[in-house]
Amino acid sequence: MNKAVWDLSIAYQNLDDPKVEQDIALIQRSIELLNNHCGERQNVSAMQNAIQTMEAAGTLLATVNTLANCYASTDAQNTQAKQLIGRIAQLNSELEQAFTPYENTLALADVSFIEQVLDHEDPSVSGQGFQIELLQRKAETQLSIEEEQLLCAVQVDGVMRGVGYTTI
């Protein structure tokens, strides 16, 4: 039986491709940008930039994740692929935490602000209407920004460490 082979050369040559680390650095920079400009999220252009940043970082994250999972799917003992999957899970959590305040602002924003945000030439921004509508529908049951960020942080390994709970 032949070993499965994935051709991912459209994105990366292999796990050692320098572009993998370059893309991870871009994801990290995107997280920094989102965190650094969080206080400006009431500004339409800042919100549009945040959406573009989140979309671009999300695409890079998904691409690197696909690479790592494809290698892991053909060799479950591939330590490098497993480590990369762990790094990506952590970065995904950090990215979600960084974007949570922006989502909160969109969920609670008035129609005028939303219309201004969506009035953008980039489809990664103008196409967010449905997603924002869903955020607004869930707004009354939404946790605080800090609570939402905590949930993102503990989802990395599926364990809520240090949190006690009881069942009824």
Image (spheres, grey):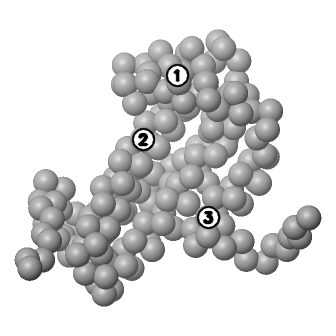
Q: CA distance from mark 1 to mark 3?
A: 27 Å
Q: Is residue 57 above or below residue 67?
A: above
Disc 2 vs disc 1: Cβ atoms closer than 8 Å? no
Q: Residue type at mark 3? A: Gln
Q: Nearer the viewer, residue 22 or 57?
A: 57
Q: How far apart are the two marked residues, 2 and 1, measured between alpha carbons?
A: 14 Å
For disc 1, the neighbor class at 10 Å (few under 14, some 14 to 19, many from 20) is some
Quadrant in the rendering for residue 15: bottom left
Which tag is nearer the camera, tag 3 or tag 2? 3
At label 1, which amino acid type do we have? Gly
Residue designated by label 3? 155
Q: Residue at x 43, y 24 (%)?
A: 127
Residue occupying the point 30% across, 60% down:
66
Q: Amino acid at mark 2?
A: Glu
Front-lying residue, 168 or 11: 168
Q: Could you tell whether 165 is left or right of 14 in the image?
A: right
Q: Which residue is mark 2?
A: 55
Report the disc number at residue 129: 1
